[in-house]
Image: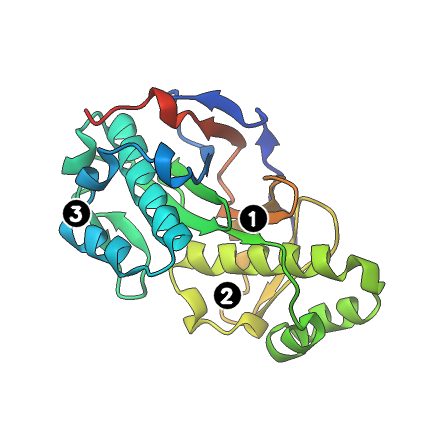
């Protein structure tokens, strides 16, 4: 059990609409949401912002909504990175780690700008911080075999808590837990290479989800803050960030006011 718990994030905004980010000081996290536009509302210049491999990824999507979702995530990531870094969006060099986590290929002087991306259904979510590891995950609520997934992938303490939940709470509880666990794995940069049952989170409705233990890192509960974020009805969203984080700002990206420069 943790000797002490990290301080909870101070939440400072409620999805304020902005076309450009404010300054990002040390200790703060900026979380942006973007609604995936309909086909006739996709800005024509977005595709030109993408690197060739990103354009190819969009082209491989056979379902139009999937293609729009990927295009929205990559174009808006570049637009926001360009504003944070004061660079043309198309010139931002993005690399991917061996385990699939995106990062700046040529980061500027310290502190390094960290970011993470997730999308599901009609929403894209982008997280940014300076010098702090972070991960974000979003999932659209849908019908699944919840108990089978919990028994297959969750830790013993999580399974025990799950067994006591009323069935009416299963959808909310499952997706809240799943996004919290995914956000932590993405923050570590490991993805599903780290088993989901090798660490345990407090399940429940509290937006601050304590990391109780991690088999590979006894100090992990002191290193990480994990929180659910109220994104939109029918969605679960979670953020994992290094425990030095002090404040979370949430913004809605005004894509109608953006341009390609």
* Mark closest to the chain's N terminus, 3 or 2: 3
Q: In the image as oriented, which residue stretches furthest toward the front? A: 40
Picture colour scheme:
rainbow
Other residues around mark 2 within 10 Å, as few (<14) / some (14–19) / many (≥20): few
Q: Quadrant of the C terminus?
A: top left
SS of the residue under disc 1: strand
Tag of residue 217:
2
Image height of 18 relative to 72, above or below? above
Q: Going by the image, does 79 lie left or right of 24? A: left
SS of the residue under disc 2: loop
Rounded to the nearest angstrom, the CA distance separating label 1 from label 3 is: 28 Å
Image height of 182 relative to 5, above or below? below
Q: Going by the image, does 119 lie left or right of 84? A: right
Q: Would residue 140 be visible to someone looking at this image?
A: yes
Residue beneath the point at 33% across and 57% down: 101
Identify the residue position indicated by label 1 in the image.
Answer: 238
* Mark closest to the chain's N terminus, 1 or 2: 2
Other residues around mark 3 within 10 Å, as few (<14) / some (14–19) / many (≥20): some
SS of the residue under disc 3: loop
Q: Of the residues tagged 1 and 3, which is closer to the observer?
A: 3
Identify the residue position indicated by label 3 in the image.
Answer: 51
Q: In this orientation, which residue lies closer to the viewer: 166 or 259? A: 259
In the figure, residue 34 lies in which quadrant?
A: top left
Please report contact status of discs 1 and 2: CB closer than 8 Å, yes or no. Answer: no
Residue 109: where, in percent of width, then height?
A: 20, 34
Residue 164: where, in percent of width, then height?
A: 84, 67
* Mark closest to the chain's N terminus, 1 or 3: 3
Rounded to the nearest angstrom, the CA distance separating label 3 from label 2 is: 37 Å
């Amino acid at each position: 059990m943790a000797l002490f718990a990290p301080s909870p994030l101070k939440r400072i905004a409620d999805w304020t609409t902005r076309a450009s980010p404010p300054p990002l000081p040390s200790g703060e996290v900026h979380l942006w949401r973007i609604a995936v536009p309909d086909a006739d509302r996709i800005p024509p210049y977005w595709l030109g912002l993408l690197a060739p491999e990103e354009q190819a990824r969009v082209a491989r999507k056979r379902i139009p909504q999937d293609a729009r979702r990927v295009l929205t995530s990559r174009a808006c990531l570049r637009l926001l990175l360009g504003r944070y870094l004061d660079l043309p969006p198309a010139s931002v060099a993005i690399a991917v780690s061996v385990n699939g986590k995106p990062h700046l290929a040529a980061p500027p002087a310290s502190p390094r700008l960290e970011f993470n991306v997730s999308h599901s259904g009609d929403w894209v979510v982008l997280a940014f911080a300076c010098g702090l590891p972070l991960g974000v995950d979003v999932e659209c609520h849908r019908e699944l075999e919840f108990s089978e997934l919990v028994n297959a992938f969750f830790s013993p303490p999580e399974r025990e808590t799950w067994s006591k939940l009323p069935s009416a709470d299963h959808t909310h509880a499952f997706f809240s837990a799943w996004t919290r666990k995914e956000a932590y794995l993405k923050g570590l940069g490991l993805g599903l290479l780290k088993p989901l049952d090798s660490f345990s989170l407090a399940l429940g409705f509290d937006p601050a989800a304590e990391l109780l233990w991690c088999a590979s890192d006894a100090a992990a509960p002191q290193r990480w803050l994990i929180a659910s974020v109220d994104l939109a009805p029918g969605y679960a969203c979670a953020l994992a960030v290094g425990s030095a984080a002090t404040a979370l700002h949430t913004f809605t990206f005004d894509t109608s006011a953006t341009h390609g420069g």
